[in-house]
Amino acid sequence: MSNFKDAQNKAHPNKSNTLMSALIVILILNVGIQIWLLYTGLNNALEDNKDIALPAFIASAVLFLISFCWLYFLPMGYKKTGKK
């Protein structure tokens, strides 16, 4: 029985490249949002507004977990199984 990862690894390289490109863009956007949250949290902390620190941390942690889960969808590459 085949599962998602087996079918994904056997996919045509063009499909794998498209999937890789989409995942890289999503991960870059997530990192950009995390940098923005860090910038916002630090600016507010320096102005003695500590109310934003916890929500910014929680949002950043959630984005990290989402990014970590996206790694499951990365293709492993085509493995040649040659018999001699």
Image (cartoon, rainbow, N blue to C red):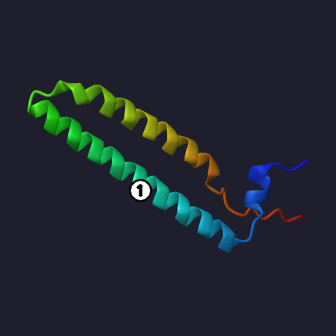
Seen in the picture, residue 21 relative to 6 is either above or below; the reply is: below
Q: 44 or 75: nearer the eye?
A: 44
Percent position (x, y) of residue 72?
Answer: 62, 46
User: Badge 1: how crowded within 10 Å, few (<14), some, or many (20+)?
Assistant: few
Badge 1 amino acid: Ile
Q: Residue 29's quadrant in the figure?
A: bottom left
Quarter the C terminus occupies: bottom right
Q: Secondary structure at mark 1?
A: helix
The residue labelled by disc 1 is: 28
Seen in the picture, residue 63 relative to 8 is either above or below; the reply is: above
Q: Residue 64's quadrant in the figure?
A: top left
Q: Residue drawn 75% across and 66% down?
A: 11
Please tell me how many numbered marks the rendered image carries: 1
Whether residue 54 sits left or right of residue 1 in the image: it is left
Q: Residue drawn 72% across and 64% down?
A: 78
Seen in the picture, residue 76 relative to 82 is either above or below; the reply is: above
Q: Residue 55's quadrant in the figure?
A: top left
Looking at the image, the residue that sits furthest to the left is 47
Q: Residue drawn 86% across and 50% down?
A: 2
Q: 21 or 6: nearer the eye?
A: 21
Percent position (x, y) of residue 16?
Answer: 65, 66
Percent position (x, y) of residue 21?
Answer: 53, 66
Whether residue 53 sits left or right of residue 78 in the image: it is left
Seen in the picture, residue 74 relative to 49 is either above or below; the reply is: below
Q: Residue drawn 65% across and 57% down?
A: 75
